[in-house]
Amino acid sequence: MSASSRRAARPASGRSTVLRILVPALLVLVWIGVFGIGGMSFGRISDVATEDRAGFLPASAESTRVQDRISEFTGSEAIPAIIVAERSGGLTEDDLAALDALAASAPDLADGATASPVIPAEDGEAAQLVISIPGDADAGEVVALLEEEADGTLPADLDSWVSGPAGFTADLQAAFAGIDGILLLVALAVVLVILVVVYRSPVLPLLVLLSSMTALCAAILVNVSLAQAGLVTINGQVQGILFILVIGAATDYSLLYIARCRDQLREDVAPARAAWLALRGVLEPILASGGTVIVGLLCLMLSDLGSTAALGPVAAVGIVCAMLTSLTFLPAMLALVGRAAFWPRAPRRGSAPVALTGADATGPWARVGRLVAAAPKRVAATVVVLLVAGCGGLTLLQADGVPQSEFVLGASQARDGQAALDRHFPGGSGTPTYVLAPADQRAEVAAAVAGADGVEGLALVSQDSPSGSLPVDASGEVAAEASAGPFADARPTEVDGQLLFSVTLEDPADSLEAEQTVRALREAVGPLDAAVGGSTAVDLDTNETSAHDRTLIIPLVLVAITIMLALLLRSLLAPLVLLATTVLSFGTALGVSAVIFRLIDQPRSDPSVPLYAFVFLVALGIDYNIFLMTRVREEALVHGTREGTLRGLSITGGVITSAGVVLAATFAALLVIPIQFLLQLAIIVALGVLMDALVVRTFLVPALAVAIGDRIWWPAAISRGRRAAPTHRKDASDAAPAR
């Protein structure tokens, strides 16, 4: 080259160097800014979250129609807290006087709070006091103040608890309080330990965690803005799943990218060039994987239950952020840091490729490949038999609902107080069921309600009454004892030609038996143009809506993911095979988990647990098959399906196993939140992810691919034995195809 030519080339080379440094540096600065702004949104996500179960029901639900009218009859949107006191052998006069004093202090605890008269039990060993907490007050804070006030006012040897709807709400608030603290710390600590073990590097795990945390900050920033605009609804359950899903998915995508980048660095490529080539290699499988998860999550928007529908867009935003940071922020950091990120095990330039198949192949995944290739049908049959056997546990699954008292695990004043109420009062005391009825059907509705099994007492809501209601008989007339004294001038409250009955049930308001009573009441009063609502009805409608969602959404998720796989693999048969293996794995995970639930004394499940688990396991579990089969297809185009499957298994083995362990461990972090729903979801998803990564992807899918041969790619040309021209490139130990 002449001197003039060299001089002309220098500026271009200089500009290229500047671009290789400037572009990654700008990307890093932008994402660091997102990290900072999004980090400030962590505290705001709790401010926009709500735990009102009734608010998540559709407007068409019967309990919603009643709930929307209750405040018109009661004059407030108060939530009741029930203080129950118990003394074996009978309450004393001092006990009752102390309860009266506690009632008198209620207005001092919250503006607008009111107290009912002290209600002694018939056996004389207990009494209850209902404190109505205004709807605009923080129930958790007021319950905490009530507990302190009760400790200071009631005799020290008198057993007392704060229970009722407000008590259970306070329990939920306390349980979810650790979501943006201990849950996040545990998840990050677990991921950090696994990454250090995988990479044996102190630097690379920190870069991965920084990328994952930035994705989470971006997801929170977007979702808080959407919640403030009223476009999405967030509760503690959605918040916890968002945190775990983003950290797990972002880390998984990072593992795939790093594997490709490391192999590019082995080929004596400059760090910026290696980062770019690695990005090209993982772009399609990561987009396909994330797109599959997003499609599955968005199917949740078809749910009639607000909390389930809300998870779809909230979690989808999280997956988008996880993909963006894994495909931009992490590559930019590795382009700047280069081989130093892998210290002290930095990839050596010009490292010799290893044999992937055949007798010279080394490593555990090559040995697994030889085992599968030796008897693919036998391996597939053995795995299928084991998975089907695990599905037998489905007979033990009881996903028909969980009493509200069992939502929160561990110690609970509300649960203990409810147990005391059940010992001395009708189960529904303090938490009535409401019947909204036409005033001209008063007698008929009263007779239908009073004649239903499971009903203990009947009253009409009255703002004139000191207790807020007037007891009535089976004919709907005010009982004699409520027509004199302070009740003499009280009349039932009538609004727009309707009355509101307050019904006390025999069974605890949060029990499945009480839900059966509500069903019976609806059958009895429905023909009279009356509607049944209240806390028990909300639980019933929530369970029935969740069961309906399962029937609707699961088939749609299967169809959507099948279409995504067909487009990705250019095949119709391969997607059906992959989906069948993932669904079988899900059934096994759910069946084995049902056995575990029995062993840990948590036999009942919320109806939405199987739905959430299905969406996560099918959408996330199919990822590992995507990472495997995209590489298998690439290799099969050159070497044939049998050889391509073994090569793909050897290449993807390490990174997919690491990704599966990371995701399972991340979901397992949900165990630190004492909520039964999250406990069961963590067990099912962690178990299912490990099964997909270690059993289905390792043995079953390769065995089926080898056994079926080229036909698995039908109707693509490769299914008829057509091959692509061989390419001269080094084998790489990653899961993504090089296009």
Image (cartoon, rainbow, N blue to C red):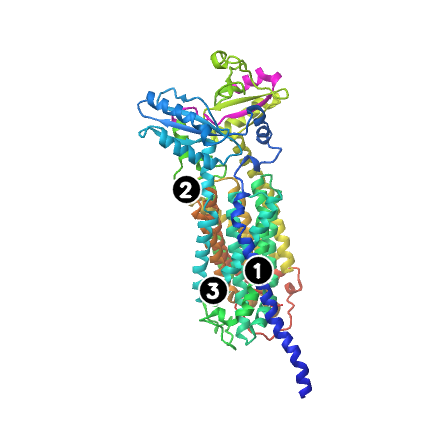
Say which of marks 3 and 2 sits in front: 2
| First to last magenta residue range | 423-450
Label 3, residues with CA under 10 Å away: few <14, some 14-19, many ≥20 = some
Type of amino acid at the residue the image marks with label 1: Trp
Q: Which residue is mark 1?
A: 31
| Pick the front one: 32 or 364 | 32
Type of amino acid at the residue the image marks with label 3: Val
- Secondary structure under tag 1 reads helix
Nearer-N-terminus badge (1/3): 1
Q: Would residue 420 be counted in the magenta stretch? A: no
| Pick the front one: 557 or 208 | 208
Determine the residue located farthest toward the bottom in the rendered image.
Answer: 2
The numbered dot on residue 598 is 2
Give the CA separation, mark 1 to mark 3.
41 Å
Left-right relation of 130 to 69 = left
Type of amino acid at the residue the image marks with label 2: Arg
